[in-house]
């Protein structure tokens, strides 16, 4: 049975402290760190119930720290006696206050609570949930369901803080544990009484716990010893070993203030006996040292004190350990240079010698050098300073930014050598190098740098100088140039010239409508790039689209800006000229003729007139065709479109002269007046000239008769407007409008004729659907308004009436989802007509609505009944198998017949037996001319079936994908086409339908067969294949980036090219298929491409990985541009590569050399900034302390060596016959699922797979 140990942070800390104690007490050489054994570092887990294990004996170093894993959900049950229950109403157990309280507690704490009633009427409560939730729930249950008592307990005031605990945690834990409320007096309250409130049981538990805490504190003691600070090092011992031994031996905790804290007080805490023993031992050490030791004082330069102290005071501890003498150093912020040595007289001499040796072991020298020379002293990639530090590794060299000094720290002899070498470098640089500073306004800095640093990099390369331009955040205009004296002056002159040019620049704002911005910029900025190339010195800035600004800013030399502005203004003028728009109303039925077959007509008009023509969508109600372009071109396109319309229909166009001042009043509010005329006159188009044009010509276009009618109405309306223009408005419910208008406009026409006023009803698109407009002379308008108001008032008076309708006619009114009733309601002001339910055997029909509407509806129903009674029924026998053919697709044929002859035709249900008596097929008009036609029409509609001979191989092509081909033919020819099952392999296709349709379908089918045979022949020609062998290494190049190269070859030669799959045996075979001639051309193209690739070479160049990102650029833009420029392919190493600096360049030899030279130049340029930053950062660190890592000035040679890692002794792999596992071995670290059997047993135990 296996054991599981939970390693908590506390147990791990104790384990580590245990190892540390062993390290301190063991006999370890002074210069060697203690190395634990394998069993100490990794103690084995205890075996539960192991044979021979003694009771009370710890199984291993893990000791008793192994804790069982507890469940996260717990359950607690407790009992509330009847006498302590707060709510004792037994009649409503589970529904009273107790249940409400429990529900509230469950919601607040998240715990689950169950109540039950014991025989003694006590309350049993079971609480389930996480520990914290259960404890909180229990506390609330006790407080709210159990009667509360209170008690006090008295303990010493100084023990109160132990009851409260850190941040009150102990008190909260105690309250949860005992389900009580514990009140502790405040510190300023002299009372020592602690009040406990809760159940009797909880109070007893809480009292017991508090008294236990107080009793435990009674046993503890605290002792404070005030001993001179100078003797603390002797009490603490070397690295605090002595005081730790004392703590272990006595069991007391001893706290000695650190050397940096000027306190004499040593605090000892613990059990009284342990504290007393520790105090005696410490006093004995103090008295002994005070009696035996003496002191001497020495003066040492303050700058050397840090070398005597050493890193973290290690040197002082070494002196104490070696000689037993304590060295007292003055505070770092003190100006004193006096050092006091305290110890036995015979040991003071050796200690003093060691102090002087440590003080003189390291010296600090400062070398003066101009701050601008520092980077040159360091050298490219730190090579100059690196040579010195390699020769003299214990010397630390520090450059201070902005200061003209270099600090050297290390052993005296080595520091002197380094100083001489640095001074020699400085002397040489002062002869060869120079610098200058020039003040340039900060607003010009980004222009000096140029796009991607192009300007400043060119100056650096050309004059071999370094130019430092301050960051924007520095808000400085001082530009520094360093390098060769001649180059510095030339670079300075060029920078000043650039600034002067920029000062002479001017800025101009062009106002360009934002809608033109994208057109000027072009797709992917192609058009604006042409403008910038034409005017390279001019910077063109477009506003951000979100700003919705029309200002385009130009900046550059004055003359160039003016030229660029004129050029852009010309482009804008052309855009404005070409953006003229014209709308032409064309009758919807003629749109398809204007488009032409396959868009031929509209395409021709667009190309010949150079315009953009937009037609409304097919499902749109709009008749407007919009033409965009130059004005003259738009007019030419309009004339051509109108000419097409005139050819197709008897369309007349007339012009009417109406004063421009009347146009708005004739159009009416939202075009209502002119729209009413257009609707009255069969949908003519009336076009008014644009506002402000000054033209009086109004154009009317449409059918000849309707144009004359519209012209007459328009002139009449204009005359009325001119003579006496008066308008009135009337509100009426939309459902009344049809009744007011009347059948065929009869009602409203009567009103117009009597009054002479024009009455306009709202169109379906108008927002105000209740508004009726009356226009004309005031007297006529008033009279018409009065009549209409009277009609509307009558309509508002709702009445209910009834009439008798024969039951056999009811179905006519309610069939087709009550269509006849809906038409009645719409036509007669929303009158409601109710027929009795089916089977009610009643003839009474109820009508409800306005009085006039009800009367009119009754009259109309009577007319319909008379018409129905005058009809007769004729039965025609037709075999049921022909019913579907007679009906046609979606019933279109039978619907056409019913509309043409004004009859109803009824077919029997499909499941009726074939030999059943003839059913009622329809109802027809009694007129003699119709009846004979009804008897004879079925014979003409009876379908026939004919066979068409079609090769079995072509059947699947005729059917088409998912039956689309055959479905299309059946819909087009209105026939049924039957194709035999594939397994029958018949060469016949049956066509069923009307004789005329079958004949057309046969011809169509034979035409389709001819097409398919031609396609088969063509397919045979296209199936010509050629294979060619090409080395697989060239395949990616032939395919190209994202398949660009191979796609182009396929497109140019109309062939299919297949490359081998990864698993194919012949990886070099490429298959080309298509027409023979095209295949041959494609093969030659690939061979030519391969020949070029074979001439190419690949070379590796090593570039510092830190420069790769900059060479590649954002999203690979820079490297793509470079590859296009040099016609090469450049591959960078993948992340985690063994050679992260290896870059492969492939191409023709000459282009590869040029590309590599360019890459090396880029690397050198980019490395300047990289190395400057990194190297300066390395040498700007604070000075190292003696013996510390991180600099070259450390005294301990071993400090700079590689870390040893975690080392243990007596490990299993060090035993005889064992070895450490090999990480790369599949045997020691097998792959999952592999079947490698272990060759020998390992110290790690048996391998498990």
Image: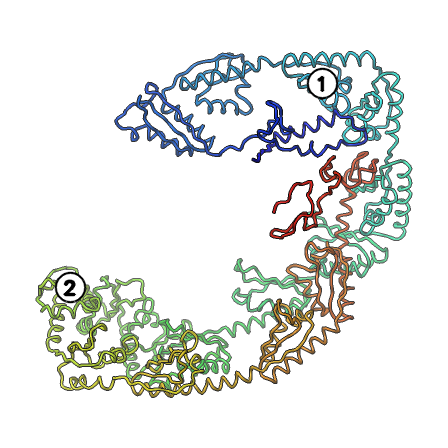
Circle 1 is placed at which residue position? 246
Looking at the image, residue 872 lies above or below residue 775: below
Circle 2 is placed at which residue position? 833
Say which residue appears at 51% left-offset and 74% top-offset: 578
**Horizontal and vertical percent position of residue 674:** 31, 72
Q: Residues within 10 Å of mark 1 (few under 14, many from 20)?
A: some
**Residues at marks 2 and 1, CA–CA distance in whole angstroms:** 113 Å
**Horizontal and vertical percent position of residue 254:** 68, 19
Q: Residues within 10 Å of mark 2 (few under 14, many from 20)?
A: many
**Horizontal and vertical percent position of residue 27:** 78, 26
Q: Is residue 740 left or right of residue 94?
A: left
Looking at the image, residue 1008 lies above or below residue 182: below
Q: Secondary structure at mark 2?
A: strand
Q: Is residue 227 left or right of residue 909?
A: right
Labels 2 and 1: the sequence-earlier one:
1
Any part of residue 590 in sight: no
Q: Secondary structure at mark 1?
A: helix
């Amino acid at each position: 049975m296996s054991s599981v140990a939970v390693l908590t942070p506390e147990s791990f800390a104790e384990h580590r402290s245990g190892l540390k104690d062993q390290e301190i007490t063991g006999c370890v050489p002074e210069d060697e760190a203690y190395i634990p054994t394998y069993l100490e570092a990794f103690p084995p887990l205890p075996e539960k119930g192991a044979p021979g294990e003694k009771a009370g004996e710890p199984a291993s170093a893990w000791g008793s720290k192994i804790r069982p894993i507890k469940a996260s959900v717990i359950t607690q049950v407790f009992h509330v006696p009847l006498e302590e229950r707060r709510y004792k109403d037994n009649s409503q157990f589970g529904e009273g206050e107790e249940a409400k309280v429990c529900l509230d507690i469950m919601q607040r704490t998240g715990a689950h609570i169950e109540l039950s009633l014991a025989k003694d009427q006590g309350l049993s409560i079971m609480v389930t949930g996480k520990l914290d939730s259960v404890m909180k729930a229990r506390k609330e249950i006790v407080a709210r369901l159990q009667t509360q008592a209170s008690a006090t307990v008295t303990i010493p005031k100084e023990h109160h803080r132990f009851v409260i605990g850190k941040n009150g945690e102990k008190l909260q834990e105690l309250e949860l544990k005992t389900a009580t409320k514990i009140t502790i007096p405040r510190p300023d309250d002299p009372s020592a009484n602690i009040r406990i409130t809760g159940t009797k049981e909880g109070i007893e538990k809480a009292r017991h716990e508090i008294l236990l805490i107080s009793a435990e504190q009674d046993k503890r003691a605290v002792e404070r010893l005030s001993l001179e600070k100078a003797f603390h090092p002797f009490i603490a011992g070397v690295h605090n070993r002595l005081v730790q031994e004392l703590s272990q031996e006595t069991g007391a905790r001893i706290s000695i203030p650190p050397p940096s804290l000027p306190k004499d007080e040593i605090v000892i805490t613990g059990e009284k006996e342990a504290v007393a023993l520790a105090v005696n031992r410490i006093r004995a050490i103090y008295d002994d040292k005070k009696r035996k030791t003496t002191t001497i004082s020495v003066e040492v330069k303050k700058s050397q004190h840090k070398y005597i102290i050493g890193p973290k005071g290690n040197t002082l501890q070494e002196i104490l350990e070696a000689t037993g003498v304590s060295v007292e150093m003055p505070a770092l912020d003190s100006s004193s240079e006096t050092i006091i040595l305290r110890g036995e007289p015979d040991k003071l001499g050796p200690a003093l010698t060691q102090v002087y040796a440590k003080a003189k072991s390291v010296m600090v020298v400062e070398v003066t050098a101009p701050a601008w020379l520092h980077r040159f002293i360091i050298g490219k990639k730190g090579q100059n300073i690196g040579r010195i530090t390699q020769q003299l590794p214990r010397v630390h060299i520090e450059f201070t930014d902005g200061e003209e000094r270099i600090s050297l720290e290390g052993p005296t002899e080595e520091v002197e050598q380094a100083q001489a070498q640095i001074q020699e470098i400085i002397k040489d640089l002062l002869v060869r190098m120079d610098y200058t500073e020039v003040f340039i306004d900060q607003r010009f800095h980004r222009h000096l740098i140029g796009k991607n640093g192009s300007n400043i990099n060119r100056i650096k390369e050309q004059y071999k100088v370094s130019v430092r331009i301050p960051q924007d955040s520095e808000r400085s205009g001082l530009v520094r140039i360093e390098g060769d004296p001649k180059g510095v002056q030339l670079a300075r002159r060029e920078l000043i010239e650039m600034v002067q040019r920029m000062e002479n620049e001017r800025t101009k704002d062009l106002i360009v409508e934002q809608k033109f911005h994208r057109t000027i910029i072009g797709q992917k900025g192609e058009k604006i790039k042409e403008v910038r190339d034409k005017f390279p010195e001019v910077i063109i800035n477009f506003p951000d689209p979100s700003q919705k600004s029309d200002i385009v800013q130009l900046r550059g030399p004055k003359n160039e800006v003016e030229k660029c502005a004129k050029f852009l203004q010309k482009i804008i003028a052309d855009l404005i000229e070409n953006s003229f728009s014209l709308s032409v109303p064309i009758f919807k039925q003629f749109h398809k003729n204007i488009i032409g077959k396959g868009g031929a007509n509209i395409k021709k008009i667009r190309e010949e007139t150079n315009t953009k023509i937009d037609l409304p969508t097919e499902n749109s109600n709009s008749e407007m065709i919009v033409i965009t372009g130059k004005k003259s071109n738009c007019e030419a396109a309009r004339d051509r479109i109108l000419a097409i319309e005139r050819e197709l229909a008897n369309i007349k166009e007339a012009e009417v002269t109406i004063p421009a001042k009347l146009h708005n009043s004739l159009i009416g509010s939202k075009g209502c007046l002119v729209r009413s005329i257009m609707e009255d006159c069969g949908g003519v188009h009336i076009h008014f000239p644009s506002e402000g044009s000054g033209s009086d010509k109004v154009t009317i276009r449409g059918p000849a008769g309707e144009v004359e009618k519209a012209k007459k109405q328009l002139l009449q309306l204009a005359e009325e407007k001119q003579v006496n223009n008066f308008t009135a408005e009337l509100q009426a419910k939309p459902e009344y409008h049809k009744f007011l208008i009347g059948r065929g406009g009869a009602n409203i026409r009567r009103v117009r004729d009597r009054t002479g006023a024009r009455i306009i009803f709202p169109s379906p698109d108008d927002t105000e659907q209740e508004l009726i407009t009356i226009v004309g002379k005031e007297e006529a308008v008033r009279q018409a308004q009065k009549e209409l108001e009277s009609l509307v008032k009558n309509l508002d008076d709702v009445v209910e009436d009834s009439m008798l309708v024969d039951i056999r006619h009811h179905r006519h009114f309610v069939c087709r989802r009550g269509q006849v009733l809906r038409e009645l309601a719409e036509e007669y002001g929303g009158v409601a007509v109710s027929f009795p339910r089916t089977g009610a055997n009643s003839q009474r029909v109820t009508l409800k609505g306005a009085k006039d509407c009800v009367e009119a509806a009754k009259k109309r129903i009577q007319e319909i009944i008379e018409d129905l009674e005058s009809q007769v029924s004729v039965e025609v026998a037709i075999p049921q198998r022909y019913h579907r053919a007679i009906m046609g697709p979606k019933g279109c044929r039978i619907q056409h017949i019913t509309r043409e002859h004004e009859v109803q035709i009824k077919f029997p249900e499909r499941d009726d037996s074939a030999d059943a008596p003839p059913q009622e097929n329809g109802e027809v008009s009694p007129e003699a001319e119709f009846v004979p036609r009804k008897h004879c029409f079925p014979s003409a509609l009876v379908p026939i079936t004919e066979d068409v001979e079609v090769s079995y191989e072509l059947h699947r092509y005729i059917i088409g994908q998912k039956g689309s081909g055959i479905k299309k033919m059946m819909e087009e020819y209105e026939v049924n086409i039957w194709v035999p099952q594939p397994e029958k392999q018949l060469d016949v296709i049956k066509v069923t339908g009307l004789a005329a349709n079958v004949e057309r379908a046969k011809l169509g089918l034979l035409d389709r067969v001819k097409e398919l045979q031609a396609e088969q022949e063509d397919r045979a020609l296209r199936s010509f294949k050629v294979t060619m062998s090409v080395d697989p290494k060239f395949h990616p190049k032939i395919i190209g980036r994202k398949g660009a190269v191979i796609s182009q070859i396929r497109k140019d030669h109309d062939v299919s090219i297949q490359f081998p799959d990864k698993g194919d045996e012949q990886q070099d075979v490429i298959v080309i298929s298509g027409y023979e001639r095209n295949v041959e051309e494609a093969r030659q193209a690939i061979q030519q491409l391969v020949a070029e690739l074979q001439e190419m070479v690949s070379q590796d160049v090593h570039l510092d990985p830190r420069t790769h990102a900059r060479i590649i650029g954002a999203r690979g833009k820079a490297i793509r541009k470079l590859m296009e420029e040099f016609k090469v392919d450049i591959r960078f190493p993948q992340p985690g590569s063994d050679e992260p600096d290896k870059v492969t360049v492939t191409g023709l030899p000459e282009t590869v050399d040029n590309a590599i030279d360019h890459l090396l130049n880029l690397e050198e340029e980019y490395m300047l900034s990289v190395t400057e930053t990194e190297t300066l950062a390395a040498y700007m660190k604070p000075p190292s302390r003696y013996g510390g890592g991180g600099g070259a000035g450390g005294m301990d040679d071993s400090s700079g060596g590689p870390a040893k890692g975690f080392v243990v002794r007596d490990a299993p792999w060090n035993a005889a016959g064992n070895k450490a596992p090999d990480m790369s071995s599949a045997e020691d670290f097998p792959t999952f699922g592999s079947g490698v059997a272990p060759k020998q047993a390992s110290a790690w135990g048996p391998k498990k797979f």
